Image (cartoon, helix red, strand yellow):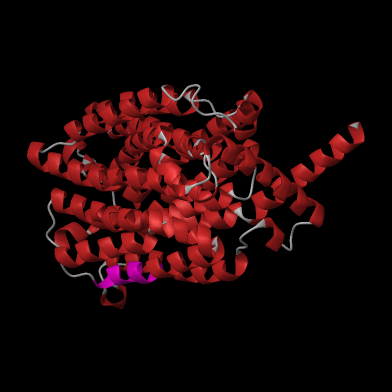
Amino acid sequence: MHSKTKEISQVERSAIAKVSKRLVPFIALMFFINFLDRTAISFAGPNGMTSDLALTAAQFGFAAGIFFFGYIVLEIPSNLALHKYGARRWLARIMVTWGIVALLFTWVSSATELYVLRFLLGVAEAGFFPGAILFLSMWVPARHRNKILALFYLAQPLTTVIGAPLAAMLIQAHGAFGLEGWRIMFFGVAVPAIIVGIVAWFYLVDKPDDATWLTQTEKDWLNKELATEDKAKTAAHGGMMRLAFTDSRVWLLSAIYFGLIYGLYALAFFLPTIIAGFEAKFGTKFDVFDKGLITAIPYLPAAVALFFWSRDASRRGVKVWHIGIPALTGAISIPIALYMGSPEATILVITITACSIFAALPNFWAIPSRFLTGPAAAAGIALINTIGNIAGFAAPYITGLVKDSTGVYQLPMFIVGGLLLLSAVLAFSLSGRVQEPVAAAAAR
């Protein structure tokens, strides 16, 4: 019996290690490019685009946020299509499409054109993030899912760590090919999406049985574990799509995610602009590359916090406080950031906020797959992401609108803090309402 247990443990370790090495880095690379293309406007804005297109803060915020209108409309249909046609085809299609749209930003010439292209970029990207979450969730059992999602999520803070200096370097190529620097930046971050999307068509596989890099024993183990979990979740909650829309936990998770995403995008879209304002506020002088490096500062510690906080969650099992404590920390830190007396102190407090948001996010996404399976998982994950991404529109638009009205960023950051506080309270209210699927089945 001991020998059999050891054999199964070795197969488990081997199978999870192969999935982690073969699929997670590539999906994370896709996510890296996805988030960079989505937030490239934040680098372009204070580096020539806002003045060249004569945008107010509210117009810039609207342009940043209108992306999410198109994204939201097609989010759930896109994720259901992924479930039907397979991740390989659908994720590759999404990526090539958004790469083509992102390329067109190189030649945008008015606020109206900017609005249209941002909307179309949202349409093109719709379904990628929840599709990637669903895809990875379909490859590993629940006890390994948090670790896998944490490795995947590392791509998001690292996008800014690497992407901000990269964007700055491209912007400094001002005048090449007769283009402004911010236009060159848009071109430079769009092309990789098209290339990697084409590679994804040939590289990804939809299920363990299609993976030539797994042994038959590893395939059998993964199929058995995933089938057992699906059976337990279906018995407890059902796998029908409509259940995703009637389960109160899905809507509660949607509200929590709304607050987290509001904080994420308020930070992502306006941090470069806040840093550009240090010159007027503190009398500092930074060139474009310096600003790119400063923008990256909060995100490297955020990646470290994400990794170690998620590792603790993997060891203990994800608890509601793995989401609630970071959300509460972010709620307290972000409103006071702009009351600091120096650029260094401001960035330090913003770093705490970034660490908090990124520590919460991968642990959050380990929760929905505990009680959703099949079409319900596809619809439920997409619904949560859809509701959350309404904040993707609201955060930059409201932040810009309130800043235009008040002349400062303090009040918009209090709004961010209030929504993160709500997320924290709702996260703690989840206690006892979500369990690992096999544990839940055993409890009955």
- Image location (x, y in percent) of residue 338: 24, 31
443 w.r.t. 32: above or below: above
- Image location (x, y in percent) of residue 110: 15, 67
Q: Is residue 182 left or right of residue 92?
A: left
User: Foreground: 222 or 262?
Assistant: 222
**Identity of the residue drawn at 28% across and 34% down:** 343
User: Foreground: 424 or 177?
Assistant: 424
User: Foreground: 82 or 191?
Assistant: 82
Residue 50 seen by the camera? yes
User: What secondary structure predominates along the stretch shown in magenta?
Assistant: helix
Query: Would you identify the image quadrant in which residue 248 lies?
Result: top left
**Image quarter in which the N terminus is found:** top right
Q: Is residue 297 left or right of residue 84?
A: left
**Image quarter in which the C terminus is found:** top right
* Residue that extends furthest to the left in the rendered view of this protein: 405
**Identity of the residue drawn at 37% across and 32% down:** 353
**Identity of the residue drawn at 32% across and 48% down:** 291
327 w.r.t. 243: above or below: above
- Image location (x, y in percent) of residue 411: 17, 31
Magenta run includes residue 106: yes
Residue 146 seen by the camera? no
Q: Which residues are magenta?
A: 99-107
Count of number-bearing discs: 0
User: Foreground: 76 or 419?
Assistant: 76
433 w.r.t. 306: above or below: above
**Identity of the residue drawn at 56% across and 32% down:** 308
Magenta run includes residue 318: no
- Image location (x, y in percent) of residue 410: 19, 31
* Residue that extends furthest to the bottom in the rendered view of this protein: 177
Query: Would you identify the image quadrant in which residue 439 lies?
Result: top right
